[in-house]
Image (tube, rainbow, N blue to C red):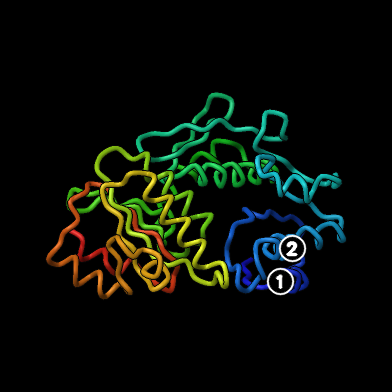
Amino acid sequence: MGANHQKEIEALCKITQPTIGYVTNFGKAHLEGFGGFEGVIKGKSELYDYLRSHKQTILVNENDPIQVEKTIDYDNKITFGTPSSDYYFESFANQNFVGLSWNGDEAQSHLTGRYNFTNLCAAASLGFHFGVDFEKIKAAIENYQPTNMRSQVLEKDGKVFVIDTYNANPSSMAESLRNFSQFTGSKTAVIGDMLELGDESDDEHKQILALAQSLHFDGIITVGKCFKKVNTKGVAFENTAELSNFLQNNPIESTNVLLKASRGIALEKVLEFIH
């Protein structure tokens, strides 16, 4: 389910009548529509409200304090994330990709970022709940190749690209930047506007720009009017077309390139101009 306003998940629950539910995270997404971060929590918790009232099952990541707090008095739940949870997985990394291990057996994914380890744990926990054995879970994890501009890693012309241009908000942007900073070799972060942030837009874009600068990338390029408003001393463009024109005569030299922005920026369009 997706939503950008309160009461949307409530309505979707009435239509779909779920018997099990999981909130992936409570991030700073669609702040304008939800009415701030507290509105995000309230809106996403509509799933919990439905499942409670119908005595259905909730999957809980016990490393997320908001999930724990919102489900603390509920018995019908499956938990993962800590040694005392129903399911607990160890993480490992192979180059830039994350994996999980279960009782010494490892499943290596083609996904990057610690946040995707949490996604793997949630998927594996649901698999176990529905009686899927680990061999099938491992095969599913190892055979999945991201191709939808979400955590997609692509090697092209001797460069490694992290293409995460399907959507962006301050929470996911911060995670992506921190993860990218751990890549080996020179790095350029190309970050585009995070949309639908309302009155908090300027502050959130300032904070993300400051975070990117603190991570000491070899290059930072911003795209979009929101970032251009706060990135007054750096390399900033109003749109992808401007950046594409710039790149034709000013190639990015770094061996690693991050592309991260909200869908409305369509940042993946510049990929063909990076050589």
Could you tell me residue 153's position as x and y percent? 34, 51
Which residue is farthest left?
A: 249
2 lies above or below 209: below
Number of on-image labels = 2
| Residue ID at (40%, 51%) | 145
Q: Nearer the viewer, residue 167 or 40?
A: 40
Name the amino acid, label 1: Gln
Query: Which amino acid is tagged 2?
Result: Lys
Q: Is residue 130 above or below residue 1?
A: above
Front-most of 26 and 197? 197
Q: Which sits earlier in the primary sequence, circle 2 or circle 1?
A: 1
The secondary structure type at the circle numbered 2 is helix
Q: Residue furthest front?
A: 233
- Say which quadrant the N terminus sits in: bottom right
Q: Position of residue 177 (x, y in %)?
A: 41, 49
* Quadrant placement of the C terminus: bottom left
The quarter of the picture where residue 23 lies is bottom right
Q: Is residue 268 left or right of residue 166?
A: left
Say few, some or many: other residues with alpha carbon within 10 Å of mark 1 (under 14 / 14 to 19 / 20 or more): some
Say whether residue 194 is left or right of residue 63.
Answer: left
Where residue 51 appears, as percent x and y from the top left, is 80, 58
Residue 42: mark? 2
Instruction: Identify the residue at horizontal 15%, vertical 67% (top origin).
Output: 248
**Local crowd at mark 2 within 10 Å, few (<14), some, or many (≥20)?**
some
Residue 123, how many percent across, how many down? 59, 47
Label 2 – label 1 distance at C-alpha: 7 Å
Label 2 with label 1: CB-CB less than 8 Å = yes
Residue found at the very far top of the displayed protein:
104
On residue 227, the disc is: none
Q: Look at mark 1 in the image and give the residue it sits on.
A: 6
